[in-house]
Image (cartoon, coloured by chain):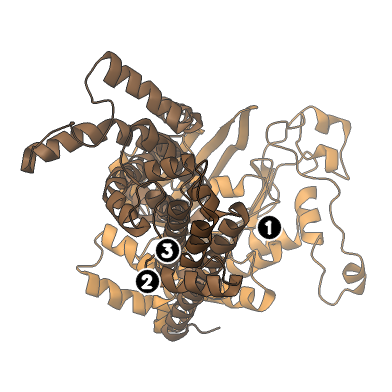
Amino acid sequence: MLASEQPESRGRSHFILKKVLGSLLTLVFVLVFNFVLFRIVQSDPIGSLFRGRNVPAAKIAELRTAFGLDESLWVQFWAYVRQTFQLNFGISYQSRQPVWNEIVSAIPATVALVGISAVLSAVIGTIGGVIAAWRRNTWKDHAITSGTMVFYSMPDFWLGMILLVGFAVVLGWFPVGGMTDAGSTATGLALLLDRLHHIFLPALTLTLAYLGEYALVTRSSLLDVMGEDYLTVAKAKGLRDVVVRNRHAVPNALLPVVTLTAINFGFVLSGAIAVEAVFSWPGLGKATADAIRGPDLPMLQGLFLLFSAAVIFFNLLADVAYAWLDPRVERA
Amino acid sequence: MNRPVLSVKDLAITYHSASGPVPAVRGVTFDLAAGDSLGLAGESGCGKSTLANALLRLLPDGTITSGQVMIDGRDLFALSPGGLRAVRWTTGAIVFQGALHALNPVQTAGKQVREPMLIHQTVGSEDEARVRSRQLFERVGLPANQLDAYPHQLSGGQRQRVLIAMALACDPRLLIADEPTTALDLMVQAQVLALIAELRRESSLSLIFITHDLSVLTYVADRLAIMYAGKIVESGPSLSVFENATHPYTRALAAAFPTIGDQTSRLAPSGLAGDPPTPGALPAGCPFHPRCPLAEDRCQTAEPVLRKAGQAHRAACVLV
C-alpha cells in the first residue's frame, strides 16, 4: 500500500468534480420543481391578477395569449427555462417592476445584515464552543453552554421583538426599523453611521440566534476529539496546552463546523424572513414576507430559485473546503 | 553504579470518577537502569497503561498520585510545568498503539515527526528537522516519500513505524512502548518487535514495554513485571518468570498461550475464568483469590506482599 502524492491529488479533484456535477444536477431538479410547484398552486394567474375586478373575457383571453398560458406545458416550460437563463422572472404583481430588478435591489441589504450576523455568530460561537469544551464542567463551560442554549431555543423573531421593544421602544437607543432615518440625506461617514445604527438590533438578534448552534456543535465535536490518542501524544511531546489545543485538537474538531458555516451562509440570501419583517429591514427576507402576503407569485418564484441556488452553491463550497481541509475525503 | 534512568517508588494513582475514587495503581516500585528493558504484562484494566501515562504525567486533571517517580534524576512530581514539558519526549518518549488514533489524521507523518524536534530545538532549523526525519524514517525502515503521507494512507505496521520514528526524534534515554504491537497482524508484529530489539542493541535506550502478551515480552525484555489489580504480583528475569512462574496468575497468563510442539496445550489452551476485578471494587485480601485455583481461606483476608522467589525473582503470593 505505497502511497504517493499523485493518487491523492487525483482523488481530490475527482471528488470535487463529482460534487460540482451533483450540484448542477440538483440545480436542474430545483428548476423543474420550481416550475411544477407554481403550476400546482396557481391554476389561474390571470384571475388572481384581476381578483375581484370585472374584466371582459376578451381582455382575459388576450392576456392569456400574451403570457403564453394558452400554450402547452412543454412550451411554457421551455419558455420558463429560457427566460430563467436570461434572468427574466417576469413582472412582480405588487410593484409592477421586473422581479429580477426587485430582487437585485434587495440583495445588498440582506447580504449586509445576514452576512455580518453569519460571520459574527460563526466566529463568536466557535470560540465559545472551543472554550467550553477545553474547560468542560467548569463555570465557563456552564455559562457558555446554558447561555447560548437559551438564545438557540428562542424563536428568532420573538427575540427580535423583545430587543426591539426593550432597546428601541422603551429605551429609545436604536431606531425601530428600516435601514436609514426617514428623509435622511446623509452621505459618506454620516450615512454609514446611520446604517450601523439601524443594523445593530437586527444583526444582534440574528447573531444571538445563530450563535448557539455553532457553540454546541463545536463543543461536542471538540469533546469527541479530546478523547483521541493523538492529543495525549501531542501533550507527551512537550507541547504547551494551548498549542495542543490550537494545532492538534481544533483543526480536527472544526471539520463539522465548516459544513455548518457553509450551510448557514447558504441561507444568507434567503435572509431571516421573520427577523427582517420584524425590523422592516428592506432585504430579501422582507421581500419574501411581502410576496407571501400578496401572494406575489412571480416574485416568490424568482426568490425561491435564488435561495435554492445559494444553498446549493454554499453546500458545494463546503464540500470543496472539506476536501481541502481533510486529507481523508479522497476515500469518500 | 549507573544512576537508574527511571526509579519508581510506591507509586499509587487514583482516578476521580462520578462513582467515587478508582485506585488504578496501588503502590508500584521498580528501577530501570540505563540500557535495560522491563516488560510490564497483565490483563486490560490492571493499571499498566495508567502506569505508562503516569511516567510522563499524562494523566487527566484531578487524578491523585502519590509516591515518587525519578526520571533521569529529576523528581517528576516536583517539576514546574515548563520543566515537565522540557523532560517530555527529550528524556522519555512514548510509543502508543498506532492502529488507533495516535497520529493526527490531518497532518502528514513527516510534520508530526518533525514537531518535537522543533519544539525542543534539538535541531537548528526546519531543514535540519527534514534531514533528521528522513534519517529516522530510514532507521525504522520506511521509505522517505512516506514523510508526505497522511496517516490514513499508511498501513498499521507503517503507522507503528512512524510512531517509533517520532519517539526517537529527540534521542530520548527512555522509550515507553504501550502495547505497540497489539493491533498488528502476526507478521507485522514480528517485524516491529525485531525493529525495537534492534534499536535497543544499537543505542543505550532503556525500554519499558507494555503488553498483555507474555510471549512477546520474553523477546524484547530482560526483566518482567506482572501486574494484577494495580500492583506488581511477580517480577524477575524474563525467562525465569516465564518458565518458572511462581504466582498462580502468572502461570495462568503463561498457560494461556499454546506451547509450540505440545499438542495438548494447542488443542486445549488453558485460560483463566472470570474477569479481572474492577479497580473501584476490589475483593478483600489477595485481589486474585476469587479466580485463583489454589486459593485458601487466608487469601481472603490478607493481601500478600512481594517476597523472594528465586534469584532476583519476587512474587506476591502466600504460597511462595
Q: Is residue A230 above or below residue B229?
A: below
Frontmost residue, B156 versus A122: A122
Label 2 SS: loop
Which residue position holds label 1?
A: B212
Q: Where is residue A64 in the image (x, y as percent from the top left)?
A: 52, 62
Name the mark nearer the viewer: 3 or 2: 2
- CB within 8 Å, label 2 to label 1: no
**Chain that appears brown:** A
- Most foreground residue, B180 or B11: B180
The correct choice, above or below, for B14 with respect to A57 in the image is: above
Q: How crowded is mark 2: few (under 14 residues within 10 Å), some or many (20 or more)?
A: few
Which residue is at 88% across, 45% downward?
B293
Q: In the image, what residue occupies the spot 31% across and 48% down?
A: A115
Vertical arrangement, residue B67 with respect to residue A309, above or below: above
Q: Color of chain B here?
A: orange
> On the rendered image, what quadrant is the C terminus of chain A found in?
bottom right
Earlier-in-chain disc, 3 versus 2: 2
Q: Do the residues labelled 3 and 2 touch (CB within 8 Å)?
A: no
> Which label is found at residue A86?
2
Q: Which of marks 3 and 1 is in front?
A: 3
The answer to whether residue A109 is seen in the rendering is yes
Left or right of B269 on screen, residue A294: left
Q: Which residue type does callout 2 highlight?
A: Gln
Question: Alpha-carbon neighbours of circle 3 within 10 Å: few (<14), some, or many (≥20)?
Answer: some
Q: Name the residue under label 3.
A: A313
Cα–Cα gap, marks 3 and 2: 19 Å
Secondary structure at badge 1 equals loop
Residue at figure coordinates x 52%, y 66% from the top left: A31
Q: Disc 1: which chain?
A: B
Pinpoint the chain carrying mark 3.
Answer: A
